[in-house]
Image (spheres, rainbow, N blue to C red):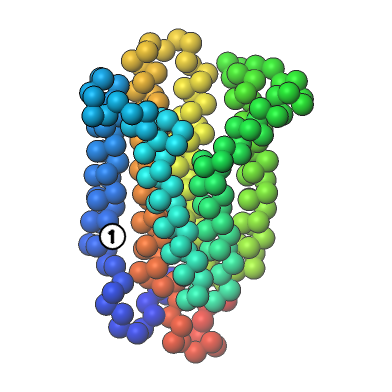
């Protein structure tokens, strides 16, 4: 992957800088985990509901959203440097949709509507609402996935490789957000309260760390530029 712009731009973050950024993000993640523990132990300074790491609209969710929005901004900026890169814009839009869903609770509301409309019943340990939310997310995935595939097909080779890097980081977030969440629901009846708290912490902590990977992936692609714009068009990858 040709990723240097040949302009001698020393403002671009190197590997050491990106490593420090990732470590800094993880430090904030750990601090939020510690704050969550203090919240559940009844520490007065952390009594507010936003300190719970699993709270909708809590500080952990806000922090994750900030990472996604910054990553989306860098992907949009990268589109100016990479020829034929609609797939990077599609990933930026996908991250923005995830943030909007967190803010406006689209999939929860749509899941509840589907439960009433379709008369959904509990399945394999999942509540009817959980089934509805899975169907809602499935609809989002179909729409967003179709947009990503179409954009991928219309993108240049460097842009496609960059999109795969972002996709790998997003897959980490999805593993914790969907996979671990569904496991927690299915085995919830047999878990102790302590076990349920640890599993919920794994889910939320994994999502936060995964969002950090998405941001670092976007920064890494920006640092590499995905293509040298100064190279003659005849030598660029297609």
Q: Which residue corresponds to the image point at 37% horizontal and 33% vertical from the top-left?
A: 50
Residue 158 appears anywhere in the view: no
Q: Nearer the viewer, residue 104 or 185?
A: 104
The residue located at (70%, 29%) in the rendering is: 113
Category of crowding for the residue at label 1, using alpha-carbon neighbours closer than 10 angstroms: few (below 14), some (14–19), many (at least 20)? some
Q: Secondary structure at mark 1?
A: helix
| Of 6 and 75, the residue lying toward us | 75
Residue 48 locus on image (x, y percent): 33, 29
Residue 48 in the figure: left or right of residue 138: left
Q: Quadrant of the C terminus?
A: bottom right
Residue in the foreground of this view, choosing between 180 and 38: 38
Q: Which residue is mark 1?
A: 18
Tell how many labels.
Answer: 1
User: Quick check: 107 left or right of 218?
Assistant: right
Q: Position of residue 46 (x, y in %)?
A: 27, 29
The residue closer to the viewer here, 238 or 26, is 26
In the rendered image, is residue 126 in sight? Answer: yes
Determine whether 101 is above or below 234 in the image: above
Residue 165, given in percent of the width and then of the height, sits at 45, 57
**Residue that appears at 45% across and 42% down:** 173
């Amino acid at each position: 992957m040709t990723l240097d712009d040949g302009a001698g731009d020393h403002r671009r973050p190197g590997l050491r800088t990106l490593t420090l950024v990732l470590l800094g993000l993880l430090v904030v993640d750990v601090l939020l985990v510690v704050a969550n523990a203090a919240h559940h132990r009844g520490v007065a300074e952390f009594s507010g509901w936003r300190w719970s790491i699993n709270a909708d609209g809590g500080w952990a969710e806000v922090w994750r959203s900030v990472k996604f929005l910054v990553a989306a901004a860098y992907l949009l900026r990268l589109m100016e440097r990479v020829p034929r890169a609609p797939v990077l814009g599609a990933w930026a839009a996908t991250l923005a949709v995830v943030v909007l869903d967190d803010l406006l609770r689209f999939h929860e509301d749509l899941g509840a509507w589907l439960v009433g409309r379709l008369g959904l019943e509990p399945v394999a340990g999942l509540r009817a609402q959980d089934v509805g939310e899975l169907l809602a997310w499935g609809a989002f995935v179909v729409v967003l996935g179709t947009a990503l595939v179409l954009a991928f097909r219309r993108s240049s080779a460097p842009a496609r490789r960059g999109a795969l890097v972002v996709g790998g980081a997003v897959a980490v977030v999805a593993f914790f957000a969907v996979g671990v969440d569904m496991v927690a629901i299915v085995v919830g009846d047999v878990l102790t309260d302590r076990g349920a708290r640890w599993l919920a912490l794994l889910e939320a902590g994994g999502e936060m760390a995964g969002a950090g990977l998405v941001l670092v992936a976007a920064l890494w692609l920006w640092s590499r530029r995905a293509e040298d714009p100064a190279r003659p068009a005849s030598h660029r990858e297609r």
